[in-house]
Every structure is written in structure tokens, then in C-alpha cells.
Amino acid sequence: MNKILVANRGEIAVRIIRACREMGIRTVAIYSEADKNSLHKTLADEAFCIGPAISSKSYLNIKAIIETACLSGADAIHPGFGFLSENANFAKICKETGIKFIGPDSELITLLGNKSKAKETMKKAGVPVVPGSDGLITSKEQAIKLAEEIKYPVMLKASSGGGGKGIRIAYNQTELENAYDLVRQEAKNSFNDDSIYLEKYIENPRHVEIQILADEKGNCIQLGERDCSIQRKNQKIIEETPSLAIDEKTRKKMAQTAIKAVKQIGYVNAGTIEFLVDKNQDFYFMEMNTRVQVEHGITEMVTGVDIIKEQIRIASGKTLSYKQEEIIPKGHCIEARINAENPEKNFMPCPGTITGLHLPGGNGIRIDTAIYTGYTVPPTYDSMIAKIMSYGKDRKEAIAKLRSAVAELVIEGIYTNSDFILKILNNPQFQSGEYDTSFIKDK
């Protein structure tokens, strides 16, 4: 692999470009008119304007991206996360064009991207799943009948959903009837697919995911778990590894279950199987993400494995650099997502120009970002502008380091959620580890 086009922007584009640099691989950046002064454009060996600010005409413009890859002579495309990273059609077109898509085959993206089909597939592979519909729900009457069978509360979910969209919880029949049309409409608007399914709502669970890597030769390893239970409106805010929610027996069982499933479906590249864990330590499959995760960095810090480099190696047809027995996670790592938003105004996005910036450092601190003094955060894209990660010998030390780093962070000119992050880190309930996905809404 000699040249990779990075089909993304922001910190993940910077992250991929740096990994390629270290591997001696040339990079091609694409950028929208809104990102003409972006860091990823500057760091890449080549850069091409892909279109106007709006995503549909730039970062989601498959035709323009493929043409740019061909024009630049790129032999592979790394999609990062978000945008086209889980777009099966994009992966298929890459293959048809002779460009390597750094991710799984389009067939698997289609299968696992459809939540109801993914659930059926995992169930066949022996993975525990949340009780719910066998396939899609096609009428209110069907939804009501099933809800009565599995008992309320239940959750209606968009089959092609993601990012917390297309989800409604119902505690009774009236709420279910009202939610039915809302979820279908939101699914249609957000994903151009109004198909939905229903499942039992596991109240106040922990959200725990297993990171896996699998190559084309049938080798598969797991890199431990991440706890992503600190969320606001189903959007992750703080992630950590290892999870305090599971004991060693459950940890081992979850990891074995994840590897078994991945091997059974023939999955290749990096992926994450996400589970809901209840108070009895029973776990249930939620979804599988067929891409690198936002929070991949904390896994890298405790294992020493560079997940981006492994993705590239796998896509090049090479064998995994590690065997399972070589993966021995050490210490504790926590990540906080810094967003350009104002928590005092219901977390309203806060684009604008950064007039002053100080990024913290020190032993055990990693920051993934693409911002700099003078950078203008555009209003067009996701509000996440940085990820601060801390590593400690144990959780107490990791919290102390992250608290210190976030307190030291200075971003002037725009509002951010850094003070809100500090409130979480200082909260006794968080510090004790006795929290679940209801943590923020209960405050």
C-alpha cells in the first residue's frame, strides 16, 4: 500500500495521516470549502477540495471521492468513523474501482449495519440478544402485541440507526402508539429508511464494548473492553477501560463470545461488538460497529496496539502483528470528549473562531485533536473538537490525571463542555464507579 486517501476530516483524519506517516505511506486529504484551513489538509502529502461545506456535497459525495482517489493515484481509502465509514455502497464501489476499502466487505457492512438483521445474525452465532422482534415491526398492532408478551418498558429503534437517533422508549401502550410514528419518521429523515424493530428496554444498564481485530487469514484477537456508560441522549461523553461493571468471569465470557461471533460471520478488519450489561452481569448484544471507534485511543494506551496501523496491515493482506497471548492490558485509561457546545444552553453547538488555546500535557496524557489558535470551528459538522485521554496505574490515578488535564485546558473564543466534564470527574458516584447509562439524566 503506497498511498491512502483519508475520506474524513478533523481529529480522526489527523490520526490516520500520522499513522500513515510512521508507516512510510503517502496520504491524500479531502476537504470541504469550510475546511480550507484545516489541519488534516496541511498534514497530508496532497489535498483536494471535494465540494462545499454541506456534507452531502463533500464528505458524503461518493462520486467525487472516488474520482479524487483515482486522480491522485491512491490505492486505498481509509474512511475513519462517521460519514461513509459504514456505507456499504461506498465500500462496494471502492472494490469495483480497484481501490482497497480499509474496512470489512460491503456485504458484512450491509448485514451488520441493519440492526434487526445484525441481531438475527448474532443470535444464530450464539450471542445473547435482548428479547424483541424477530426482524422488523411493520404495524402498530404487531408492536403492541409483542410489547405485551415481553413486558414494558420496550424500545423502538430505527433499523439503520446510529448516533442515538431513531430511538424511543415506551413504558405503556399509549407511549408506544405515540412513539411508533415518530421513530419511523425520524428514521426516514435521518437514514432514508423507515424500517424499525422493537426490543425489551434494559433499564439502567452499563454499555460495554469489545474491541476486535481480524485478518484475512482467519486470525482474530480481542483487545479488551471499554465502558461507555457515561452518555447524554445516547451519545458517549466519557469512556474508560477496563470496565468496573464486570468481573473477570464475565470479562472472559464476553471476549470469547465476541471472537466466536466474528469468526463465525467471517469478519475482517477492526470492529467493535457492543453489549448492554444488566445488574446481574448478564450481557446482551446491542450492535456491531464495522469501523474504528472514536474511543479507540484508550484501548491503544492500555494494550500498546496501534489500531489504525493494524487496520492498514489487514487491508494490505498481512497477518495481525499480535497473537492473543501477547495482549495483556495494563493500567487504566479514561477518555473525555471535548465538544464545542454550551451546556448552560441545553448543550447548544457553539461554532466560532478559537482565539486562544492551551492544550495540557504531562505523563500519561494523550490529546487527539485538529484545532489550533485561529482555527474556526464550522457549524456544519459534529461538535466534537478534541479527545483528552489519561493513563494511570489504576483508575484513581487515571481520574486524577484527567481531572488535572481538563482543568488545565484553555479554549478561548467559543464555549465548550470542559466544565461539565469536570463536574462528572468530581462526582463521587462517578469516582466510585457506581454509575450506569442513566447517570447524566438522573443528575
Image: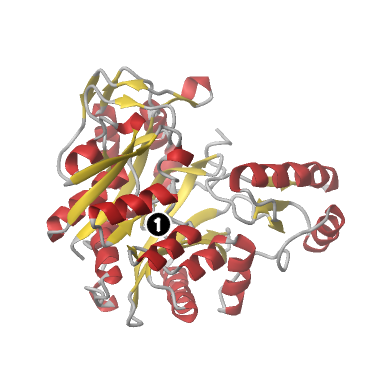
- Residue at the image point whose x is 77% and y is 62% from the top: 150
Looking at the rendering, which quadrant does residue 32 occupy? top left
Closer to us: 396 or 24: 24
Horizontal and vertical percent for residue 271? 41, 64
Closer to us: 330 or 11: 11
Horizontal and vertical percent for residue 133? 73, 64
> Left or right: where does residue 259 sit relative to residue 143?
left
> Considering only vertical position in the picture, is 430 above or below 213?
above
> Considering only vertical position in the picture, is 409 above or below 207?
above
> Left or right: where does residue 121 sit relative to residue 257?
right
Looking at the rendering, which quadrant does residue 351 occupy? top left
Q: Can see residue 399?
A: no
The N terminus lies in which quarter of the figure?
bottom left
Q: Can see residue 55?
A: yes
- Residue at the image point whose x is 23% and y is 39% from the top: 41
Closer to us: 310 or 65: 65
Horizontal and vertical percent for residue 324? 29, 76
> Left or right: where does residue 1 sit relative to residue 103?
left
> Considering only vertical position in the picture, is 215 above or below 66?
below
The type of colouring in the image is: secondary structure
Horizontal and vertical percent for residue 248? 41, 69
| Count of picture labels | 1
Disc 1 marks which amino acid?
Arg
The C terminus lies in which quarter of the figure?
top right
Task: Label 1: state its secondary structure.
Answer: strand
The residue carrying mark 1 is 226
> Left or right: where does residue 148 sit relative to residue 279?
right
Number of other residues with Cα within 10 Å of mark 1, as a class: few under 14, some 14 to 19, many 20 or more: many
